Amino acid sequence: MLSRARKLRPALALPVAATLLITIAAVPAAANAAGTTGDTSAADDRQYVALGDSYSSGVGAPPYTDGDCDQSAHSYAAQYARNNPRLSFGFSACSGATTDDVIAHQLGFLGPDTTLVTITVGGDNLGFTSTLETCITALHDSTCKDAIDKALAYIATTLPGKLKQVYGDVLAAAPNAKLIVLGYPQLLAPTFCFEAPLDANRRGWINHAAVKLNEAIGNTAKTYGAFAPVDALFDKHRVCDDDPWLNGITAIEDAFHPNLAGYTDGYLKALDAVFHPVTATH
């Protein structure tokens, strides 16, 4: 079925993709508008706190325990908490969250007892979903290129300051914590398939934007904590690869987010590689 899908011509697949993306586009905007659903302002502090956007809440690996923020027990954060039960867990991540949303609504679990904070944030600052929608549905490559160029300009001029603000506020609220910032994967394999009906130019531009986003995040994060890159782990597991760890467009609102394998073998593995909690010995 996969090889057959890869033979579909882009012109035939795009109308179907456009219909699906109308549904996809509506979801992060609604979650972002409802950012107060992740509000933890009155919460007690926790030892491990997971902050950020849909890549931390677990979008792509249902079922979801929080209907507004799309928090999943299959997220890397929830899995890490189960694997380290001695750490009390605060789950604040919310689908659609920007840096401003994290600062406004997600810091309540932080405090002097917090020893670990993880976060993915920045993608929604760029208009992640609207940019993908534009690139999938646009009739001309130039329309997609313009959208990507706007995202790249934001990465170069505005995003670093936004990241510094959110990282600084996190550490101010949790002065004893180790902050680990996780990156994002490039989404698309080189080969065309129905799950990502984009020509080679558009796939390349989208992946390039992910590279530049990770560079900005990594360069900023190293001043505040540790950067945990995930992109290399997703190599050969992108949308249209034979063993994808990312959902394609037929996943509707979960499109272009990690599936269970992506969170377990990608994000959780990246986190484990950079942080090991100290356990008491007797």
Image (tube, rainbow, N blue to C red):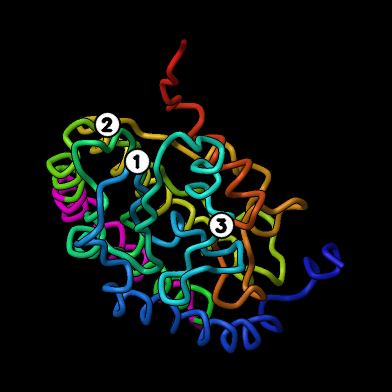
Q: Which residues are magenta?
A: 138-165
The answer to whether any part of residue 153 appears in the image is: no
Q: CA distance from mark 3 to mark 2?
A: 26 Å
Q: Label 3 to label 1, Cα distance in Å?
A: 20 Å
Residue 61 at x, y = what percent? 61, 61
Specify the amino acid type for callout 1: Val
Relative placement, left or right, of 105 versus 237 is left
Quarter location, residue 126: bottom left
Mark 3: which secondary structure?
loop
Q: Residues within 10 Å of mark 1 (few under 14, many from 20)?
A: many
Name the amino acid, label 2.
Answer: Gly
| Image quadrant occupied by the N terminus | bottom right
> Element type at marker 1?
strand
Residue 255 at x, y = what percent?
57, 69
Asked if one can make out residue 133 in the rendered structure from this viewpoint, the answer is yes
Residue at the disc numbered 3: 73
Q: Is residue 161 magenta?
A: yes
- Picture residue at 68% right of the left edge, 69% below the top: 195
> Which residue reaches farthest top?
282
Instruction: Give the crowd class for mark 2: few <14, some 14-19, many >=20 residues within 10 Å.
Output: some
Q: Is residue 169 above or below residue 204?
A: above
Q: Is residue 75 left or right of residue 153?
A: right
Residue 233 percent location from the top left of the image = 59, 38
In this view of the protein, which residue sits in the foreground, 65 or 197? Answer: 65
The answer to which quarter of the image holds residue 170 is top left
- Disc with the residue nearer the chain's start (3 vs 2): 3
Q: Main secondary structure of the magenta part?
A: helix
Position above or below: 63 against 267: below
Looking at the rendered structure, which numbered label has been put on residue 181?
1
